[in-house]
Image (cartoon, rainbow, N blue to C red):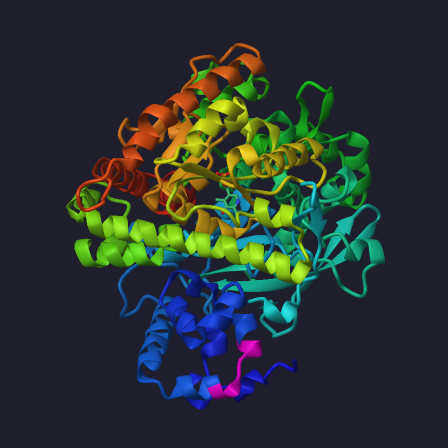
Amino acid sequence: MTPPDLTLLPERLSRLSELAHDLSWTWNAGREVFRRLDYLRWKQSAHNPVLMLRQMDVAVLERAANDPDFLAAYDRALLTMDAWRAPANGHARTYWQTKVGAPVERPGGAPDRIVAYFSAEFALHQSLPIYAGGLGVLAGDHCKEASDLGIPFVGVGFMYPQGYFRQRVSADGWQQEVYERLNWADAPIAKAQTHDRKPCVVAVPLGIRTVLVQVWEVRLGRVRLLLLDTDLEQNQPWDRELSARLYSGGQDMRLQQEVVLGLGGVLALRALGLTPAVWHLNEGHAAFVVLQRLRDALANGATWETALVEVRRTTVFTTHTPVPAGHDAFPFNLVEQQLANCWGSMGEERDHFLALGTYDNGAGPQFNMTALAMRSAGAINAVSQLHGDVTREMFAPLWPDLAPGDRPVGAITNGVHVPTWVAGDLGKLFDRHMGAQWRDRYDEPAFWTAVFDIPDEELWAVRRSLRESLFEFVRERARVRFAEENAGTARVVAGGAMLDPHALTIGFARRFTAYKRPDLIFRHPARLAQLINNQKHPMQLVFAGKAHPADDGGKHHLQNIFRQALDPAFGGRVAFVDDYDLHVAHLLVQGCDVWLNNPRKPLEASGTSGMKAAMNGVPHLSIGDGWWAEGYTGDNGWRIDGGLTDADHAAVDDADADALYRLLETEVVPRFYERSTKGVPTRWMATVKHSIATVTPRFCTRRMVKDYIERAYAPSFRK
Ligand SMILES: *Cc1c(COP(=O)(O)O)cnc(C)c1O
């Protein structure tokens, strides 16, 4: 199909393409525009308006241009977008302006100082597949909230043309990774331009050569993202592949990517005339930012000591995992090799720099990216209160003289972006009963008592319709795999074709890896089968998630789930939905009845999918790990607690599985099926309401980013 020339958009809709290229449509009035424009194409494109517009029928566009209802939605969306982009004059002041002050603008409109936020992945929308999982979702939600709060903010990451991977599962349940090249024209990105309107390209020293990096840009309301890409003709073929995929290749590839992200990111910001007052490193992947900044300071005549003091004053570091292998560490010879061209300007400071990253995590001293970040950041935080305790313990050798409570690691518990994750229909229900002001006040805990005044029937009706949307999607995906990929019966059955749209549905979706124990619920198959096959009160399980391509252990867990789904003992009521991404995540966290999370404590730093579910009235059934250790109140969900922590894995798993079954048998199932004369599960709705009212205000990115502003960003701006 030849794409229509977008310059041929009807005059009245001439800014439709601009709207599609600003991803803030994903959480504001723009969404309604694209839904209305052509609902079928909207669904077929997995909600990608850029792709949709390229395939649009001109007649449909003409019709829309003459439809008053459509035009009203279109004008409303443009107004929102323009108001956001305009300087504050005449508009309501943003949170940032009130708390920190209005950014001073430079000629050309850029703020004089920014927060630069570095992350190896960003999950903004399924049409931009540059994320693998939780870390990316957190980064994406952080950027969206930065836009809402009006922070002068720029994200820096990678444009991976082949993304992470698309997941398929073979007929015997083994994960297949499919790499598709992104069609750039279908993604909401553009080449970043320097002040003289040239494409922004920077040269990064890597090994004994120089690699050119193209800078792309994504608009996201008030903020933007810069994405680095090495696929330039001038580069060697192997260097062009450097940014092709996320988290693939061996250690050497990973190290080279991290050099490009750290050094290239700093150079890109400078080339675009942006001056960070705060450098926020999201996880250790970006810690080489520190190296480039030290090089710059030394080149400008600073001493090592003054350079490091300045870097520390302005660097913020967030650490994300209590799993030791989750922290990148490289052998020194690799680091020496890849940084060969960097040392030139560093002279004898090189040894000082290597010392910043030197750390022994049990496998002998290595160059550890987390250690580098921790030794060069002035503000360090973990992502839940419990994770704070674990991190202070885990990295104790960095501060040999300090008692645990004095080690400089704080905790800012994660959150999720409410307008992104709360279902549209639920939001409209809140509008009707709490007023549209809920959209500005959702981080106020007291405000949410109003949820208890919503009639149970109405909330239950929304919950049921969200469950129906999930089942419609699951069936359609199984049908498409059957029709288009010739999937055999095994894949169709395991894909959920026999699920019961009325049964209590337990969701479990996250990365497949051992510590998350995806198969814990199958520990006693007979006991589980009794729950699932109960004639009057059936239960069913829906799983989704990817295993890292190199994690065979994770793939075995996935295969086990797939085999369980095919076991007739579970009657077709266990399903595995393939290719988990943001789109599938939305449907699952909104459409299930209960969200299950059973990691081996304390290995889940925070977890965020449970927050998304809980705010949609899908109560959390979870080990008291990560955010749930502080989120559980006694009546907003359930805490699985087998009572064992120090015993061996098998004993802990047995105890936790037993506790899980007991909760399902005695609490969850009876409560769900106890119905009033009107058919409403009254006691269940009480749990649903507590879940919404307690989780939304405390575990939203609004609360989280305000914490970052107060504790990590504002101090540097106020100086
Ligand atoms: C929210 C989300 C995650 C993170 O979920 P956890 O519960 O933190 O494991 C991963 N992947 C996708 C697609 C998500 O939306």
Residue 8 image point, x, y percent: 53, 88
Q: Which residue is most to the left? A: 453
The residue positioned 48% from the left and 21% from the top of the image is 657
The residue positioned 28% from the left and 26% from the top of the image is 634
Residue 296 seen in the current view: no
Within the image, what quadrant is residue 348 found in? top right
Q: Which residue is most to the front? A: 535
Residue numbers of the magenta segment = 53-59
The quadrant of the image that shows the C terminus is: top left
What secondary structure is the stretch in magenta mostly built from? helix
The quadrant of the image that shows the N terminus is: bottom right
Q: Residue 612 versus residue 592: which sits nearer the camera?
A: 592
Q: Residue 513 versus residue 596: which sits nearer the camera?
A: 596
Q: Is residue 571 left or right of residue 287?
A: left
Q: Residue 377 versus residue 10: which sits nearer the camera?
A: 10
Residue 307 image point, x, y percent: 60, 39
Residue 486 seen in the current view: yes
Q: Is residue 55 magenta?
A: yes
Residue 11 image point, x, y percent: 44, 89
Q: Is residue 195 above or below residue 267?
A: below
Residue 198 image point, x, y percent: 65, 73
The residue positioned 74% from the left and 45% from the top of the image is 256
Q: Is residue 5 above or below residue 498?
A: below
Q: Is residue 611 magenta?
A: no
